[in-house]
Amino acid sequence: MRKNFLGSGNDAFVCENCKLTVRPLTNGSYRDHCPRCLYCKHVDVVPGDRLATCQGLMEPVGVEYSPKKGWMILHRCTRCTELRRNKAALNDTEADDYELIIALASSP
Ligand SMILES: [Zn+2]
Ligand SMILES: [Zn+2]
């Protein structure tokens, strides 16, 4: 789906919220959020392009389940309040914290 961006942007990064070093996904897709606290950064205009100038920390505010795509995490930027959906990574060696996703799903 995002194979065009392979090689650019799929690098390890340090989570600005919990300081975890986040390694890239091994299944070929693009990691855009922290598996431990689910925060991400507002760095993309189109997922993977790293063209956004905001650079704000994006907080996980909810999750949605899509029958086609699976769990989608809803992120809101703490700087510009933009909302964005990101696919949860649950089948990777460093999978997202499922408990956290369930907790988000059951919060109002
Ligand atoms: Zn984190
Ligand atoms: Zn932003």
Image: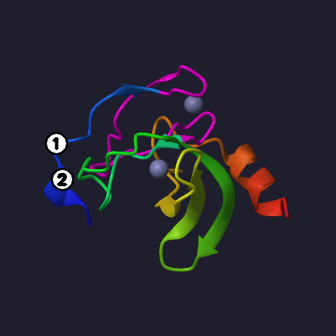
Taking the image as shown, residue 89 lies to the left or right of residue 81, namely: left
Q: Which residue is mark 2?
A: 5
Q: Quadrant of the C terminus?
A: bottom right
In this rendered view, identify the residue nearer to me: 70 or 20: 20
Q: Amino acid at mark 2?
A: Phe
The rendered magenta stretch, by its main secondary structure, is classed as loop
Few, some or many residues within 10 Å of mark 1 (<14, 14–19, 20+): few
Image coordinates for residue 105, horizontal then vertical, percent: 76, 61
Few, some or many residues within 10 Å of mark 2 (<14, 14–19, 20+): some
Magenta stretch encompasses residue 23: yes
Magenta residues, start to end? 15-39
In the rendered image of this protein, does residue 62 appear above or below residue 17?
below
Magenta stretch encompasses residue 34: yes
Q: Which residue is mark 1?
A: 8
In this rendered view, identify the residue nearer to me: 40 or 25: 40
Is the CB–ligand 2 distance for label 1 below 8 Å? no
Image coordinates for residue 78, horizontal then vertical, percent: 59, 45
Taking the image as shown, residue 37 lies to the left or right of residue 57, namely: right
Q: Amino acid at mark 1?
A: Ser
Quarter of the image holding residue 8? top left
Taking the image as shown, residue 37 lies to the left or right of residue 100, namely: left
Residue placed at 29% from the left, 62% from the top? 46
Image coordinates for residue 99, horizontal then vertical, percent: 74, 45
User: What element does badge 1 sit on?
Assistant: loop
The answer to whether the residue labelled 1 contacts the one labelled 2, judged by CB atoms less than 8 Å apart, is yes
Q: Quadrant of the N terminus?
A: bottom left
User: What element does badge 2 sit on?
Assistant: helix
